[in-house]
Image (cartoon, helix red, strand yellow):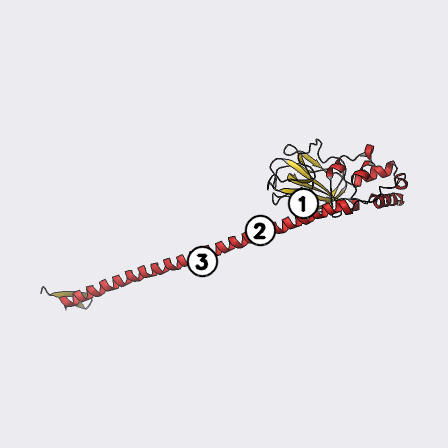
Amino acid sequence: MKNRLIITISDINGTKSYNIHQFLRKFIIIILVIIVFALGGSFLFISYLNSGIQKVKDAKAYQLEELENLYALQIENKVKNIEELASKLEDIYSIIGVENDATEDEISENTLKFIDLNKKNFTLKVIPNGQPLEDISISSGFGYRKNPITNRNQFHRGIDIPAPMKTPIHSTADGIVEFVEPSNTGDYGRVIKIVHNYGFKTIYAHMSKTYLSVGDIVKKGEVIGLVGNSGRSTAPHLHYEVKYINKILNPKNFMNWEFTNFEQIFKKERKVEWESLVSLINDHQQIPRQ
């Protein structure tokens, strides 16, 4: 009896006993052990495959990330190259403009004598003049200078006016807002560009806050934003530019322009064709208003 296994089954019909040889019992145990090992091995093998697949996925993801970073870097370098080229072209244009776009003759006396008090006031209202900040001290002037960020000799298209954070910035003439960047991005950071009459434009950069939107009508002296340190800037200041069509002008000439020295701008800033412009203003002022 010691080499037999007795299995007893009871139900409603009675009790039945079955004798199973010890060998059969061992065989069943071995089969069960094999099944357990097979299941365990399958589980380990599947885990190994999953781990391998995950490693492949991680490797591919890493490669894709590296490619994305490489492409992003290449794009960024291309953008910088384009920006540098555009800056150089603009600088060259400005230099050429100084030599070739200067009017050969000063504005004529015949034209000047028709500029009365009303026309002077109108001109100083619609063409940039005066100070964008109440207190002015220039830390970096117009023209070539060593860039404080790149430490390279570059053309400075405006002037830098240091001021405490959140100092109010004023529009220097009537105009319409052409462009606004309200977030801190790019070289200029928060910036506003205003288009004025007769082809003039002013740019106000590195602001801490902008008050205007594209299409807004601005009056001379209106507060358009606050001084800041946004963009590529080393300290709170206003970067201020004045342009005429595509020509870069020295803002200092226009900041010093006022009623008492009205005719001075015609001699100092020779890139503007003042003769034709003043004649046009005279014509506009003579048109009767309904």
Residue 60 tag number: 3
Within 10 Å of disc 3 (Cα), the crowding (few <14, some 14-19, many 20+) is few
Give the answer, above or below, for where 164 lies relative to 99. Answer: above
**Circle 1 sits in a helix, a strand or a loop, which is it?**
strand
Left or right relative to 49: residue 274? right
The amino acid at mark 3 is Lys
Which label sits on residue 77?
2
Q: Which residue is mark 1?
A: 180
Q: Quadrant of residue 208?
A: top right
Label of residue 284 in the image: none
Secondary element at image label 2: helix
Assign the N terminus to one quadrant of the image. Answer: bottom left
Residue 122's spot in the image, x, y percent? 83, 39
Cα distance in 3D space between marks 3 and 2: 25 Å
Q: Nearer the viewer, mark 3 or mark 2?
A: 2
Image coordinates for residue 23, horizontal then vertical, percent: 14, 67
> What is the C-alpha distance between the residues marked 3 and 1?
41 Å
x, y percent for residue 222: 73, 37
Mark 2 vs mark 1, foreground winner is 2
What's under tag 2, amino acid-wise?
A: Asn
| Residue 260 image offset from top left, x and y in percent | 82, 32
The disc, 2 or 1, on the residue closer to the chain's N-terminal end is 2
Residue drawn 77% across the image and 47% down it: 100
> Residue flagged by tag 1: what amino acid is it?
Val
**What element does badge 3 sit on?**
helix
